[in-house]
Image (spheres, helix red, strand yellow):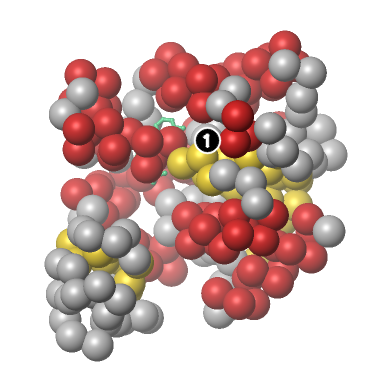
Amino acid sequence: MNIILLGPPGAGKGTQAKRLVEKYGIPQISTGDMLRAALKEGTPLGLEAKKYMDQGALVPDSVVIGLVKERIQKPDCAKGFMLDGFPRNVSQAEALDATLSELSQKIDHVVCMEVANEELLERLTGRRTCRSCGAGYHVRFDPPKKEGVCDQCGGELYQRDDDNEATVSSRLKVYDDQTKPLIDYYSKQGKLRAVDGVGSMDEIFSRITAVLG
Ligand code: AMP
């Protein structure tokens, strides 16, 4: 099963993807995570991507399309994959369709997680992540027992560089302008499965698994 998780930044795509991976046994492919990993390693691609990420802008299509094309052909994708944060515009979606068609594959479901813009700003600016184990927290909705310290491993919690208020506003605008047209793109293909992204993690997980069948 090949799935796309669509939705604005802060809709909870990454959180749900991690749980869906366990249930369906297919890998999560997050272009944001791949770019952050490249940046951490200090590769030329990572350093180039940072310029765009810091502004809340999209990294050039050629870069992310190349990453995804290579990734979906790895052996662990044989039973399917879950794309999180890709495609982000119509050109990327068209490139993905063309690649999948060359591989005699297709996208089965596009899960669109819906959350109002006003809520996203608070969700994103309050996000914190553990530097050691990657566990996610929120200063208001899911705080750690001790401020700045991971409950699971004692690691240091940090805020993503692009989760500050100015960059978040740009990212939300980019979503509205460039990514939202994908709702129409995949509706026309009969693949869009809209899911209410407001509620507890368990509620949202059940809604997603219900539409995936
Ligand atoms: P994310 O972790 O998905 O919120 O992505 C963080 C940032 O990485 C975005 O604001 C973009 O700068 C960049 N990025 C991630 N995925 C893509 C993509 N599919 N196309 C272009 N830029 C991307």
Give the image quadrant in which the ligand numbered 1 is located: top left
Residue 127 in the figure: left or right of residue 93: left
Q: Residue at x 25, y 73 (%)?
A: 153
Quarter-of-image position of residue 131: bottom left
- Secondary element under disc 1, as helix, strand or loop, is loop
Q: In this image, 3 relative to 171: left or right?
A: right
- Who's the residue at 51% across and 40% down the image? 29
Residue in view at x 43 percent, y 14 percent: 62
Give the farthest residue toward the top.
102
Q: Quadrant of residue 184?
A: top right
Question: Which is more toward the observer, 7 or 84?
Answer: 84
Q: Quadrant of the N terminus?
A: top right
| Above or below for 143 versus 65 | below
Give the quarter of the figure containing the C terminus: bottom right
Residue 18, image x and y in percent? Answer: 52, 58
Q: Is residue 99 left or right of residue 27?
A: right
x and y percent of residue 11 in the render?
50, 59
Residue 163 visible in this rendered orientation of the protein: yes
Tally of numbered tags: 1
Front residue (pair 11, 177): 11
Q: Which residue is mark 1?
A: 86
In-front residue for pair 84/175: 84
Q: Tell me residue 181's x, y (percent).
A: 61, 35
Q: Assess mark 1: CB under 8 A from ligand 1?
A: yes
- Can the viewer see residue 117 in this picture? no
Identify which amino acid the numbered label 1 is placed on. Answer: Phe
Q: Residue at x 57, y 44 (%)?
A: 27
Residue at the far bottom: name it. 145
Residue 85 x %, y %: 49, 41
Residue 139 vs 161, above or below: the answer is below
